Image (tube, rainbow, N blue to C red):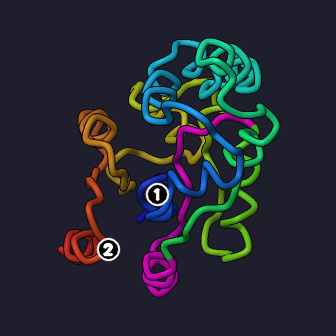
């Protein structure tokens, strides 16, 4: 059985003091939540996830619209920082008998390199399927079909784990066993059934 794991929210988590870290790293002044809500809803941001735009341009535009609450270079360093690794899940995956394990994540090109590097040192995954490299992002069913094609696998041979309900639903629609991640214990129970 092949295992596909999402990154953000499954293998990597923001630390509990996320907001304080942003302020400390960038000197941010202003409405953080509104900025990131706008960023994640931005059409050009979604193009970045598909590898068709550069996040630096999106940051420049939105920072300007928000009155330049921090320096873009500092924001970029913070954006590409290492996050808290779900070590317990990695150890569980290592001890399991999956034929192969792959990352399956929406990432823009700058952060994808950091994520791959941070997780590669743990040596538990075979390939990283980042949306910016595939040219298509979750929840588009073509994202999953592209991965299946690259793996030369049928949906029935794959388990996909993600923390986003929509992504899980779409993977399930094409026949992949899809599990919505809420905790390590919940995931272990579902994988063992």
Q: Position of residue 79 (x, y in %)?
A: 67, 44
> On the picture, is 135 further left or further right than 57?
left
Q: Position of residue 125 (x, y in %)?
A: 61, 66
User: Where the C terminus falls, by quadrant?
Assistant: bottom left
Image point 42% across, 55% down: which residue?
9
User: Where the N terminus falls, by quadrant?
Assistant: bottom left
Magenta stretch in the rendered image: 87-109
> On the picture, is 91 further left or further right than 121?
left
Q: Which mark is residue 5?
A: 1
- Which residue in the protein does label 2 denote? 184
Was residue 93 drawn as part of the magenta stretch in this picture?
Answer: yes
Image point 69% across, 23% down: which residue?
68
Comparing 49 with 135, the one in front is: 49
Comparing 77 with 177, the one in front is: 77
Distance in Å between CA atoms under marks 2 and 1? 13 Å
Image point 55% across, 68% down: which residue?
84
Image point 55% across, 71% down: which residue?
85
């Amino acid at each position: 059985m092949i295992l596909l794991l999402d990154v953000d929210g499954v293998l990597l988590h923001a630390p509990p003091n996320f907001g304080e870290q942003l302020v400390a790293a960038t000197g941010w002044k202003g409405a953080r939540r509104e900025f990131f809500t706008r960023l994640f809803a931005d059409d050009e941001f979604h193009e970045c996830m598909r590898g068709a735009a550069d996040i630096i341009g999106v940051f420049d535009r939105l920072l300007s619209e928000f009155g330049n609450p921090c320096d873009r270079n500092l924001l970029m360093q913070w954006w590409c920082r290492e996050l808290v690794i779900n070590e317990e899940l990695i150890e569980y995956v290592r001890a399991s008998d999956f034929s192969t394990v792959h990352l399956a994540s929406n990432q823009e090109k700058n952060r994808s390199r950091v994520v791959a590097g941070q997780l590669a040192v743990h040596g538990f995954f075979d390939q990283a399927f980042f949306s910016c490299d595939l040219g298509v992002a979750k929840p588009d069913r073509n994202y999953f079909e592209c991965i299946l094609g690259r793996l030369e696998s049928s949906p029935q041979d794959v388990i996909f784990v993600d923390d986003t309900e929509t992504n899980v639903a779409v993977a399930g629609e094409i026949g992949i066993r899809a599990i919505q991640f809420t905790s390590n214990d919940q995931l272990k129970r579902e994988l063992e059934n």
